[in-house]
Image: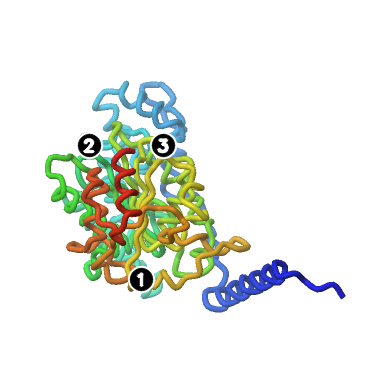
Amino acid sequence: MTSFDTSSQSNVWRALLALAVVFVMLATTGWTALRNHRGPTALEASVTAWEHGRLDGRRLPDAQAAPARLSRFFASLTAAQRASLARRYPLAVGNMNGAPVELRYRANRAALRTARTVERRRMHDKRLSPSGQREAARRMHRYASLLDPGRHILAFDPAGSGRIAEVFGDLDRADRVSVVVPGVDTELLTFQRTGRKYSAPVGMAESLYAAERAASPSTRTAVIAWADYTSPSGLGMEAATASRAEQGAVRLNALLRALPGRAPVALFCHSYGSVVCGVAADELPGRVSDIAVAGSPGMRVEKASHLRTSARVWSMRDADDWIQDVPNLEFGGLGHGADPVSAAFGARVLSARGAQGHAGYFVPGTESLENFAEIGVGAYRTLACAHEDDTCRADLSAAVAA
C-alpha cells in the first residue's frame, strides 16, 4: 500500500477541517434562504420607469451608464429639469452614480417620505402578524429619523433588509474623503444605534468626522457611512465566504468612481468590511490613497502586495478582539486568508490601544480612532504604531514619502 507523504496528509486534514466547519455552520445557521420576489422592488420599478421616461420629448440616458456620462447629462439640464427628474424618479435618481450629490440627497428624502408612509400603513395592517407590525413600526421610525433636518442620504434602497449610505460634511468641496465600510449584520435597522453607538455605521462615521476635524481644522473633510451593500447576516456561511464581499466590492467601486472632485479617498474597513475592501482593491480608482482595516478576518490574499493596489495598506487589532481567534486560512472557499496584522502580511500595523474589543475602534479617545483620523487627513507623521520599533518607523517614513 502506498503511503501518503506529509504534504498529502496535511491536505487531507485541512479538507476534513473545512468539512467539519461546513457541517457546524449548517447545523447552527442553516442554508441561506433565498427571498422570493413577487415583483420588482421599489428601486427596480423606479429605474424601469426612468428607462421608459422622457424629458421634453427626449429619451433619458441609461441609468447604468458611466458616471461621467450621467454627470454630463445632468449638467446639461436646468435646475427645474433636474428637480423634475428627482420628483418623478426618486429612487432611481437617489441611487444613480453620476447624479449630482445634492440632487441625490433631495431624491432620497422624497423616497424616504414614501417609504415612511408605506410602513405607517403596514403598522396597522391586520394581515400582518404582531411581529410583522412591530417590524413595520421599527422601519417607520428609522425612516423618520433619516428624514431629520441636516441628514444627507447618498443612497437608499428599502428592499429586503435595506441598503443605505449617509454623508457627513460637504462632499462636493472636500479636500479629503473617508469611506467607512462596515461588516456583518449591517442593514437599515442597524445603521445607527443609541446604545453601543460607535459599533454602527452612523456612529463610526460621525466619530471619524469629528476626529478628523480635530486633527486638522483647516482640512475640509467628508465622511461616508457606507452600508450600501448586502452584508452577511450573523457569523454563518455567508460570513465565512466571499460571496457577499464580491457583490459589495462591485458596489463600492461604483461609488468611488462616481465621487465628485479629485480629493484623495481613504477606506476604513471594519471586520467583514475588510473582506469587501480586499476584494475591491485591484479595481480601486487611483484617487484611493489608503486602505485601513480593523478587526479583520482577512482580505482574501496572503500578502498586502497581492491586493494589487497603489493605496497604502494599514491594519490594526485590539488585544481583546475575539477576531484574533478566527483561523486565518482560506480553503475550499471558506475563510479569508492571512492575518493582516501579521508581519508576513506586510501591512503597516498601527496601535488600537483603548479600543476594547471587536466593536470599539471608532470610540472617541482611542488610539485606533486617532490613527484613523490622521490617515483621513493625510497626517502620516503623527500615527501611532502598534510596536515602536525601527520597522514601524521605517514604514511610516515610507508612507510620508509615498
**Quadrant in the rendering for residue 80:** top left
| Dot 2 amino acid type | Asp
The answer to whether 328 is drawn above or below residue 68 in the figure is: below
- Of labels 3 and 1, earlier in sequence is 3
- Residue 295 placement (x, y as % from top left): 37, 63
Q: CA distance from mark 2 to mark 3?
A: 17 Å
**x and y, in percent, of residue 182 in the image:** 36, 57
Q: Which residue is mark 3?
A: 285
Q: Which residue is mark 2?
A: 175
Label drawn at residue 303: none
Neighbourhood count class around disc 2 (C-alpha, 10 Å): few under 14, some 14–19, many 20 upward? some
User: Which of disc 2 and disc 1 is earlier in sequence?
Assistant: 2
Question: Where is residue 321 drawn, in percent x and y?
Answer: 35, 71
* Quadrant in the picture for the C terminus: top left
Placement of 379 over or under 388, stated as above or below: above
Q: Residue at x 22, y 67 (%)?
A: 194
Q: Nearer the viewer, residue 130 or 33?
A: 33
Q: Nearer the viewer, mark 1 or mark 2?
A: 1
Residue under numbered circle 1: 321
Residue at the (46%, 39%) spot, across then down: 48
Which is nearer the N-term, disc 2 or disc 3?
2
Crowd band around label 3 with a 10 angstrom C-alpha radius: few (<14), some (14–19), many (20+):
some
Amino acid at the residue labelled 1: Asp
In the foreground, 287 or 116: 287
Q: Residues within 10 Å of mark 1 (few under 14, many from 20)?
A: some
SS at mark 3 in the image: loop
Disc 3 and disc 1: Cα gap in Å?
A: 31 Å
